[in-house]
Amino acid sequence: MEADAELTDKRQRFIDEYLLDCNATQAAIRAGYALSGARQEGSRLLSNADIRAEINKRLAEAGMPAEEVIKQFVDIAKTRLNDYLQVVVRERGTKIPQPLAEAIAELDEKILFEEEFTVRSIHVLQLSAKEAAKYQAGRRQHVDAMRLSKLRYEIELSKNPDATRLIDGPPETYEAVELDMVALANAQDLGRIKTLSYTEFGPKVEMYAADGALRDLGRVLGIFEKDNRQTAGTDVEIIIGGSPETPDA
């Protein structure tokens, strides 16, 4: 009788632990079953009709009926990271080559414009002779910088008639993939993803293992029978419509 009572206590502990995270293997370990056979033991216990009934009862008391648990497992198993990726169209600048002869011609036009602007702006501002001299000196530095750039281009062009420089070209659009943060936040609230956090490199998403969710769903539904002998390295046969056997105490 003591052995039966101890086993009953361990089963109850398994139920308690399983309800924490719905992980049969970890629940078996925390309940005191051997680590080496925890996966098989968890599957065996979860296939027991009495244990499943107690789990369903506890879930119902907590406001989560078995149907809702099954739906949660289904949602987790169907969740893919691609569900939270969206394609967006963005714009980026481009660079195009410009022959140096064109660049020199542009600088000639700019130098002439700046010189004319300097003369005419002195009259508009009605500067005194002293103020005008200071103003012209400041403007001359700007024009002299363009003259030096022109000289550099002329020297380069004399050495290489095909020389070019890169200038801004027309913008181009491209497609990029980014995370839908709103959808991810909603999925986290619904329990469909494990964690959503932010690091120095950006958002970090951890998904639940889809195969684990499917495996647990199959155990809850009693799809995996004891006679399938789910041991490491053996094939698993799925029986639809069978009634699970109660494991020996």
Image (cartoon, grey):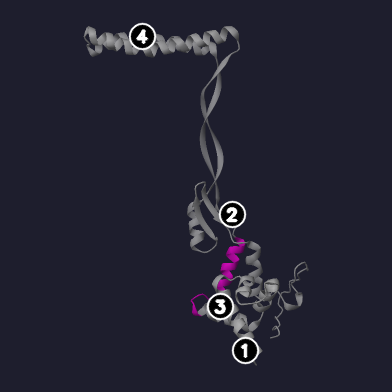
From the viewer's side, name the closer residue of 143 and 63: 143
Q: Reading the chain from its start, which is encountered first: label 2 or label 3? A: 3
Foreground disc of the pair 4, 3: 3
Q: To which residue does mark 1 refer?
A: 5
State the CA–CA distance, disc 4 to disc 1: 102 Å
Q: Secondary structure at mark 4?
A: helix
Q: To which residue does mark 3 refer?
A: 16
Q: Secondary structure at mark 1?
A: helix
The magenta region covers 61-78
The amino acid at mark 1 is Ala
State the CA–CA distance, disc 1 to disc 3: 16 Å
Asked if the stretch drawn in magenta spans residue 90, the answer is no
Q: Secondary structure at mark 2?
A: helix
Residue 199 % position (x, y): 50, 50
The amino acid at mark 3 is Asp
- Of all residues shown, which one is farthest toward the bottom? 1
Q: To which residue does mark 4 refer?
A: 115
State the CA–CA distance, disc 4 to disc 2: 61 Å
What numbered label is drawn on residue 81?
2
Identity of the residue drawn at 65% across and 77% down: 33
Q: Residues within 10 Å of mark 4 (few under 14, many from 20)?
A: some
What secondary structure predominates along the stretch shown in magenta? helix
Tell me, yes or no, whether the two marked residues, 1 and 3, touch with CB atoms within 8 Å. no
